Image: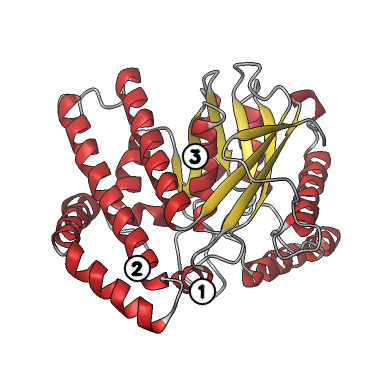
Amino acid sequence: MRVPPVWVRRLILAPLVVAAALAATALLPAWLVIAIALSIFIEPRLRTPRLLWMGYLYLLWDAAALVALFALWIASGFGWRIHTPRFRHLHYRLVARMLEFLFWNAYWVLRLDIDVRVPEGFHDDDRPRIIASRHAGPGDSFVLIHAVFHWFERSPRIVLKDTLQWDPAIDVVLNRLPNRFIAPPPAPGRRRPRDRDLPDRIRDLASDMGPRDALVIFPEGGNFTERRRRRAIDRLRAAGLSAAADRAARLQNVMAPRPAGFFAAIDAAIDADVFFVAHTGLDRIRTVVDVWRELPTDKVIVMRFWNVPRASIPADHEARTDWLMREWERIDDWIERHRPDGQDAVSSPPSRTAASDSTR
């Protein structure tokens, strides 16, 4: 769905979210009591009030963020100093607090926990990072950025889909910070503008990263679905890349990565090491129906990071493409061995703090 113009998002969508949050708060006792009463008689797991409560909290979260962002805009001289280092820092602090609130409520309402494993020495230097992650659903982006803020103590620069600008708070705050909203390639048979200068935009984003910055990118280009996985394989075959298509067909949990934007970031951020991210736990939760079916989730999201030193990244394009596919095959294999419904599920106890992992 095409994103509406900026004036529509600022003058219509944002006030609507604030008004909806106020209305939902005013009617909170009524709808919450009715939801609990109906849930007691219909289903025992209180899925209806849990789902409504999380939806309400997200609406309230969005509205509160918009009010805070409006206050920062006024304090910056009505936008005059909004892009200065001081106000960039204030916006990053706001995003970190927003995510902290969101995940605190997810932990208590949905019984959702996060287990993060990072390599030894991850925090030992102040060099920038490039973090490339698989993309399993809308929730994993929030989890990864939360991890970058709270466990890695870095300021993320994110490459993300332009459709996320439908969310007013995400739209406002991320457009004030160094991020890039991109238009993904259109599906076959659909007309949609293509982001043709994507590598240049990502190269520009990565070129001036500071020592505590981290560029977060999802090389698959979208959330994993079986249809998109097949489409990625067909795209490779149509390009005459039969060997690459055969390797992509063996991937069962991820899609073949699109290398252009990722390689542009590597070439621009010459001091940055690369970290890959495999994670599992929310693989089957992509829609509201999935959330309803899984509530309460009682899930542990396991995130596994490993690093590739800068000197180990091939310079030749063909060799680098093979290297990226091998890393993606590694992610696919890790997911297969650690997904919750597999026989080799993670046996270590969940932790809400990041654990060091010295193995590759």
Residue positioned 76% across, 64% down in the render: 342
Residue annotated with mark 2: 49
Tell me where residue 355 appears, x and y as whole percent: 67, 33
Residue annotated with mark 1: 293
Left or right, 55 with respect to 71, comes to right
Mark nearer the N terminus (3 vs 2): 2
**Mark 3, mark 2: which one is toward the viewer?**
2
313 is higher (above) or lower (below) than 349: above
Disc 2 secondary structure class: helix
Residue positioned 57% across, 29% down in the render: 152
Tell me where residue 323 appears, x and y as whole percent: 81, 42
Left or right, 111 with respect to 333, comes to left
What number is the disc on residue 146? 3
Could you say which is closer to the camera, residue 270 or residue 130?
Answer: 130
**What is the distance, in whole Å, between disc 3 and disc 1 at their CAs?**
25 Å
Could you say which is closer to the camera, residue 282 or residue 210?
Answer: 282
Disc 3 secondary structure class: helix
**What is the distance, in whole Å, between disc 2 and disc 1 at their CAs?**
14 Å
334 is higher (above) or lower (below) than 315: below
Q: In this orientation, does residue 14 appear?
A: yes
Residue lying furthest bottom: 42
**What is the distance, in whole Å, between disc 3 and disc 2 at their CAs?**
26 Å
Left or right, 20 with respect to 278, comes to left
What number is the disc on residue 217? none
